[in-house]
Image (spheres, grey):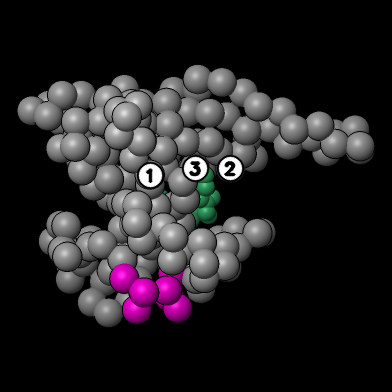
Amino acid sequence: MIVKTLDRGRSIRSATENDFEQVMEIDRLSFSAPWTYNFFESALQNIFLVLEKETELVGYLIGCVCHDLEKAVIIRIAVHPDHRGKGAARTLMRTCLDLLVQKEIGVVELDVELVSRGAIKLYEKLGFRIADVLVFPSDFPGDEETFYIMRLELPKREEQVGS
Ligand SMILES: CC(C)(COP(=O)(O)OP(=O)(O)OC[C@H]1O[C@@H](n2cnc3c(N)ncnc32)[C@H](O)[C@@H]1OP(=O)(O)O)[C@@H](O)C(=O)NCCC(=O)NCCS
């Protein structure tokens, strides 16, 4: 299902299993701990968007809606290294946020590692703010892992999301 048609032959649509080969390649190039096929398969039950340019996948976003809490979580987003710095992640995020507004979700959260400066900047530009800080201790001093929980209050249906 096409969610959004963009310029320059690009579109955003819901993912299918046929996308997994390219999605998993992007994932492998983007994360030190890539997801397995089963993780992506389960994600099909959630919000799973892919941005493609003609037949090539540029990036993907996975989110989850907790309807009883009227809250959503962005679980994973990645853009192929060859396509970074051109607004792909922002477009995926905005499309997802618009979908969540349509679903009348009030709050979106995500966690991001402190070292992922580019991702933090992306989320801040979309209006996310740091809601909490989690530090996972390590046996080795200076090796602690720090994560930000970032949160965005979504506008009501009629209003526009982000900058
Ligand atoms: C983070 C990631 C998704 C960004 O994708 P992208 O398509 O390059 O991002 P965009 O081009 O849409 O950037 C939108 C804004 O985010 C910020 N941003 C994105 N990447 C950045 C970087 N490396 N350094 C600084 N700012 C960055 C910028 O403010 C940018 O706006 P600008 O172009 O007007 O300056 C991509 O680098 C990636 O896949 N990284 C590996 C996986 C990852 O870290 N995922 C997030 C896990 S929480």
Q: Earlier in the sequence, mark 3 or mark 1?
A: 1
Q: Residues within 10 Å of mark 2 (few under 14, many from 20)?
A: few
Badge 2 residue CB within 8 Å of ligand 1? yes
C-beta proximity under 8 Å, tags 2 and 1: no
Q: CA distance from mark 2 to mark 3?
A: 5 Å
Badge 3 residue CB within 8 Å of ligand 1? yes
Q: Foreground mark, 2 or 1?
A: 1
Q: To which quarter of the image does residue 20 belong?
A: bottom left
Q: Say which residue appears at 55% left-offset and 38% top-offset.
A: 112
Residue type highlighted by circle 1: Cys
C-beta proximity under 8 Å, tags 2 and 3: yes
Label drawn at residue 116: 2
* Residue farthest to the top, as pictured: 131
- The residue range painted magenta reads 16-23
Q: CA distance from mark 2 to mark 1?
A: 21 Å
Picture coordinates of residue 82, whole percent (x, y) = 45, 68
Q: Which residue is mark 1?
A: 64
Q: Secondary structure at mark 2?
A: loop
Q: Say which residue appears at 56% left-offset and 21% top-offset.
A: 132
Image quadrant containing the N terminus: bottom left
